[in-house]
Amino acid sequence: MPVEAKPAATARTTSSPPLTERQEARRRRILHASAQLASRGGFDAVQMREVAESSQVALGTLYRYFPSKVHLLVATMQDQLEHMHGTLRKKPPGGETAAERVAETLMRAFRALQREPHLADAMVRALTFADRSVSPEVDQVSRQTTVIILDAMGQEDPTPEQLSAVRVIEHTWHSALITWLSGRASIAQVKIDIETVCRLIDLTAPQDTEPGGN
């Protein structure tokens, strides 16, 4: 599918200087417009000219922030995940084990996306289409997902084994989104898959040595 794009040299990167308050406000308007358009009509409804008009920025300005709608929609997903994280922090998961808390957290995030299926489909398709030029935005999505999972675990200093488990959980969650959006998995099956993969967390948890143990 053709993607509207400008030269990759115009992309914002992680080494770009911090945005001013005015620039950040403009960026937020762009992301809001992107989410609104995607919510109404999915991936195809997000046209850069319409995003520019809706967010009241010049088309050239929009391309300086986001070189293509793939860049824009991946950034939109990171923004949506950030909002979800804030909501989740206000009402933390109540499971007794780290695996239960992470599974509950991911299912709550999944159900939030379920309420906006067109938006979810647009964001996931953008991730699927993303090439190397979109790596900074994709990395931000991955980092935000990792933070959400570690927060649910109550883990600030994860071991390499735990981080590996988190990556597998992220892959499974993303795959579950794709299979659900394509109609190849029910919500019940997604829940089973998420709960199953989250058990890796308990398997990789550091084992306490009991007093007097050898």
Image (spheres, helix red, strand yellow):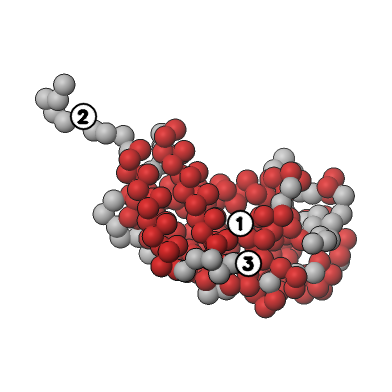
Reading the image, the residue beneath label 3 is 121
Q: Is residue 68 left or right of residue 191?
A: right
Residue 63 image point, x, y percent: 83, 58
Q: Which residue is drawn at 84% across and 70% down?
A: 49
Residue 140 image point, x, y percent: 62, 49
Mark 3 is on which residue type?
Asp
Q: Tag 2's secondary structure?
A: loop
Reading the image, the residue beneath label 1 is 78
Q: Is residue 90 left or right of residue 27?
A: left
Mark closest to the chain's N terminus, 2 or 1 = 1
Mark 2 is on which residue type?
Thr
Mark closest to the chain's N terminus, 1 or 3 = 1
* Residue positioned most to the left: 212
Reading the image, the residue beneath label 2 is 209
Label disc, if present, on residue 37 of the rendered structure: none
Residue 47 image point, x, y percent: 80, 69
